[in-house]
Image: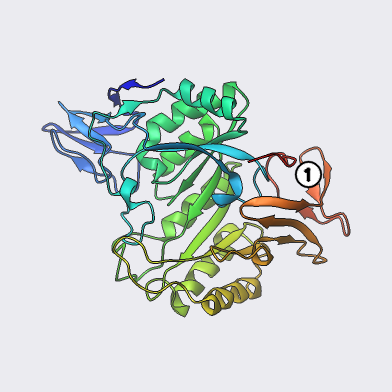
Amino acid sequence: MFYVGYVREARLYEVLGDGWVKCLVCERFCSVPPSGRGVCGNYVNIEGRLYHSGYGRLSAVESRPIEIKPLFHYWPNSTALTYSNYGCNFYCPWCQNHYLSFTRPSGSEPVVEPFELVELALKYGDEGLSASFNEPTTNFDYIIDATLEARKRNLYSMIVTNMYMSERVLKTLIEAGVDGFSADIKGCPGLKRALVGIDHYKVFRNAKLALDLGAHVEMVYLVVTNTNDSKECYEWILRNHVDTLGSEVPLHINRYYPAHRWSEPPTPIEKLLEIRDKARELGIQYVYIGNIGSSIYESTYCPNCNKLLIARSHYRVTYFKLDHSGDKYKCPRCSREIPIRGRYIEWKKY
């Protein structure tokens, strides 16, 4: 299955002259000198052409529940073969997967071909593929090829992403068949302690574009203590959610724990509840609190009659009560349509 890899010429780049090239994959739009690499470390300039040196050099491959992404309204109770490479375009100092995100591919790692990845998903009984753990944008060319292979075998494809990709890349991903996005919103304008210079609104811009192109999107807000948890910051995030994405796009408010270079204490539960209450006040209809081990705050209720529709525990669905006709799901009590993408998977051993 594994063998020594190689590089692939990048799909999206621009020749600048004097041997320089411009990477068009993410919103950093790195200008790369001869023999140089972009910020993520995966795209290298070789003799005036941009190559994906990280192509297929996977750092992890494992079957995981879709709810752990988190995606609560996408193929409920399914599992996805989850894969990652190395590097990132953000380098969050609190990253729990820093051992992957802060590492660049050496060029000597083995490569997993896209068709091999799909065969492994089928072997494990997974319903789809998920690019996760580090930033998938750094593995763009591979994800396109893996997604095209997955479509041939009727597997879904989704990614867990900081959503800081170029609009052209986003469109290309969706055209290939990526139809699920767990999109992280890291902060707000004026963030000073980390991710300085990032235009956080572009995350919402891209999430809106994904919705307009027919994809499924759920937003994830990791509330980092004394970093992006001020009232000014969270209200900016919540208002942009409502104004740009609408009230039916799910929002996951997740608890932060110290990791890597960040030693601030875990997010107080009271802060998470405060943000949840404000989200509800602004009209967001599906608000969840994650990373606290409570099924109460991870359950789905009908926004019209408050009936319990989906209960979850330990990243699995333990109760599912929705009327289903075609691709539509409705509350069995009041017939309110509930946004669900994909098929609910009956209980299976995981």
Is the residue marked by circle 1 packed among few (<14), some (14-19), or many (20+) residues within 10 Å? some
Q: Residue furthest toward the right?
A: 333
Q: Residue furthest toward the front?
A: 349
> Residue at coordinates 54% horizontally, 68% vertically from top-left?
238
Taking the image as shown, residue 29 lies to the left or right of residue 165, namely: left
- Residue 285 or residue 319, whichever sits in front: 319
Q: Position of residue 136 (x, y in %)?
A: 41, 42
Taking the image as shown, residue 191 lies to the left or right of residue 163, namely: left
Residue 72 shows up from this direction:
no
**Quadrant holding the N terminus:** top left
> Residue at coordinates 37% horizontally, 36% vertically from top-left?
139
Q: Position of residue 274 (x, y in %)?
A: 57, 78
- Residue 243 or residue 207, whichever sits in front: 207
* Amino acid type, mark 1: Lys
Taking the image as shown, residue 333 lies to the left or right of residue 51, namely: right
Q: Quadrant of residue 261?
A: bottom left
Q: Is residue 325 above or below residue 306?
A: above
- Residue 51 or residue 57, whichever sits in front: 57
Q: Position of residue 120 (x, y in %)?
A: 52, 26
- Residue 317 or residue 204, whichever sits in front: 317
Q: Is residue 170 above or below residue 68?
A: above
Q: How many marks?
A: 1
Q: Secondary structure at mark 1?
A: strand
Which residue carries the number 1 mark?
A: 328
Q: Position of residue 61 (x, y in %)?
A: 45, 35
